[in-house]
Image (cartoon, helix red, strand yellow):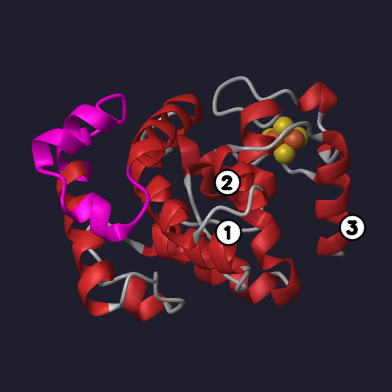
Amino acid sequence: MNYKDFFDKLEDSLEGSAHLDELANANHDPFRILISTIISARTRDQNTRKVTKRLFTKYKTPQDIANLSEEELQDLIYEAGFYRAKAKHIKETSQIIHEKYDGKVPRDFDKLIELPGVGRKTANCTLAYAFQIPAICVDTHVYRISNRLGWTKSKNPKQTEKKLKQLIPKDQWIRINRLFVKFGQQICLPNNPKHEICPVEDICPKNFSMEQK
Ligand code: SF4
């Protein structure tokens, strides 16, 4: 399998940009990308966009956000799923970045993953979108589509990440999340995927076994 050709083919068939891609394309700073990735968990792109815009219109830096109370943060991000827990994590993470890292998001997986509210997915998304460092961010779309394509037979995102790293050349890693999020929103939908217009239908085994378990 030539993965570069595969991703080129997807790219040609998809429109627009998903939220994190938009932020990265707009050259927004790594802090905004990190916080928006925390906000995006279990939240639709349109709500993540809205909440990120509202928060960063007034408050720009880790220090600004660390100075907000949890209640103020909750009011600013209430359209996001689990907004109470996220408000707590965003405040704590902002505080650590301000105090320990001099206001700069660390470019290091092990340091990122120690921040409150930051798991493997958020750490990898931040590396890929904010710093263009090769990383595979396994969200719900990447997990589902990798299994359907037969690239992985994983029970969890960590296994998917490991397998994809073995299969796919490193220079293609940062394309995976960007393309699979759009692909998962436009064609390979969670329910009723549009096989009839799928550009890679001819090589897809349509493996839904992991979704039935
Ligand atoms: S053929 Fe269907 S299941 Fe396979 S990638 Fe395309 S839309 Fe998804």
Mark 2 residue crowding within 10 angstroms, few (<14) / some (14–19) / many (20+): many
Residue 23's tag is 2
Q: Within the magenta stretch, is there residue 74?
A: yes
Q: Position of residue 168 (x, y in %)?
A: 71, 69
Camera-nearest residue between 194 and 172: 172
Q: Within the magenta stretch, is there residue 24?
A: no
Q: Nearer the viewer, mark 1 or mark 3?
A: 1
Q: Position of residue 200 (x, y in %)?
A: 83, 41
Q: Nearer the viewer, mark 1 or mark 2?
A: 2
Left or right: 105 as drawn, with respect to 154: left
Q: Is residue 136 visible?
A: no
Residue at mark 2: C-beta within 8 A of ligand 1: no
- Element type where label 1 sits in the image: helix
Residue 129's tag is 1
Identify which residue is drawn at 30% across, 77% down. 101
Mark with earlier residue (1, 3): 3
- Look at label 1 and name its amino acid: Tyr
Camera-nearest residue between 16 and 29: 29
Camera-nearest residue between 32 and 205: 32
Magenta stretch in the rendered image: 59-86
Left or right: 107 as drawn, with respect to 2: left
Mark with earlier residue (1, 2): 2
